[in-house]
Image (spheres, rainbow, N blue to C red):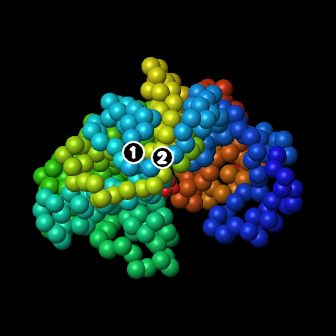
Amino acid sequence: MSSFNGDIQQACAEHIFGTYARFPVAFVKGQGCRLWDDKGKEYLDFLSGIAVCALGHCHPEVTRAIEEAAGKLIHVSNLFYTYPQVELAAELTRLSFADKLFFCNSGAEANEAAIKLARKFSNDRFGPGRFHIISMKNSFHGRTMATLSATGQTKVQKGFEPLVEGFVYVDFNSVAAVEAAITDKTCAVLVEPVQGEGGLNFASPGYFKALKALCRQRNLLLIFDEIQTGLGRTGSLFAYEQESVTPDIITLAKALANGLPMGAMAASEEVAKAFVPGSHATTFGGGPLIASAALATLRVISKPGFLEKVRETGAYFVSRLEEMKNRYPFVKQVRGRGLMVGLELEVPGAKFVTKCMEKGAIINCTHDTVLRFVPPLIAGRPEVDTMIAILEEVFKEEAL
Ligand SMILES: *Cc1c(COP(=O)(O)O)cnc(C)c1O
């Protein structure tokens, strides 16, 4: 425990920007799918950051990698080579469509890099003026100026105008809407394979294939924001694999280093060539400590059988929720793939989140009415059963 022993909520309000509406809980320890607060109360974590701690809290192999790296080399400039960074890039290219990686420190930064790369690629190939990017309504791409401008939700933009120029928003899951929005200024389409913050929205089968064909035909780059869906969350290492399409650029972050801050942009060789020395840079990106943590994380996720179990546990979880749906009229729909699962309600979800927390389970609510479950990927049937039992209690109270 820290030497600080005042009232943490009061001290936080006094000293930290009020950018987060926090729950009245302070966590001090985590292990696997469990968290403990400062009063010693134990929680089942079905949020894992927000889809960040994919291997659960303090996974022994990741912790060992961090400890070893911390004792050896934490940082040198990207003016030099470091082994973990190059090893991680080699591993990610082996496991994906991509040929080249750029490492940064967050999801927003990964999307910034992708936006810059798309503009630069188009500029080099087709000349200036072709810089518009089509993104989706209800999307989420980050909080920096370019990424909040790319985000198709006015609530993240309000008060920060003028926005970065050149973003056009269309309905998710409509190829016709994208086609209608293309002009001679368009250079790329940016889309999440599953909308996470937008309420766990899945596209219809064939949507991404048709979108890819349209992009090919009109010389547009297809950028997948896999910051939330990537690295096993939906039951395959990358969500694009299940859509039978190859994007031109993908962005990663959340689960990449199992809780340490790391983002990445990956692209095909042809597209990556648009970045040359001086095009883009970041001081901390891909440093040896963080890259070592990411390598350890990736090695566990890509072990034979790991993703099979994610799919199996996810299917079991969805089937248990479907069964509950039939008994509670305020449950509207269950949506899930792998361990990215949403339960849409007919009513606001906030009070259910609070009640679950009181009973010892951490979840959250996105888009007002969608309960989001993104547990550590190491969760199995016993954890699902505990989550269902708590949800059952909460729903029973609501139904009274
Ligand atoms: C979380 C998230 C981001 C932003 O990541 P940060 O690390 O918070 O900047 C961008 N896109 C998607 C799909 C996300 O889920």
| Residue identifier under label 1 | 80
Which numbered marker is on residue 363? none
Q: Which quarter of the picture shows residue 187? A: bottom left
Query: Along the line of sight, which residue is nearer the eye, 80 or 290?
Result: 80
Query: Along the line of sight, which residue is nearer the eye, 321 or 98?
Result: 98
Asked if marks 2 and 1 touch (Cβ < 8 Å), the reply is yes
Residue kind at label 1, given as amino acid type: Phe
Please name the residue shown 32% across and 30% down the image. Answer: 94
Please name the residue shown 49% across and 69% down the image. Answer: 156
Q: Residues within 10 Å of mark 2 (few under 14, many from 20)?
A: few
Q: Position of residue 186 (x, y in %)?
A: 21, 65
Please name the residue shown 71% across and 38% down the image. Answer: 30
Residue kind at label 2, given as amino acid type: Val
Q: How many marks?
A: 2
Label 1, ligand 1: CB separation under 8 Å? no
Instruction: Answer left or right for 14 relative to 82.
Output: right
Q: Position of residue 48 (x, y in %)?
A: 61, 42
Q: Is residue 391 visible?
A: no
Q: Which quarter of the picture shows residue 229? A: top left
Instruction: Answer left or right for 310 relative to 282.
Output: right
What kind of element bears circle 2? loop
Q: Position of residue 164 (x, y in %)?
A: 36, 73
What kind of element bears circle 1? loop
Q: Residues within 10 Å of mark 1 (few under 14, many from 20)?
A: few
Residue sitting farthest toward the top: 304
Instruction: Answer left or right for 206 relative to 225.
Output: left
| Residue identifier under label 2 | 76
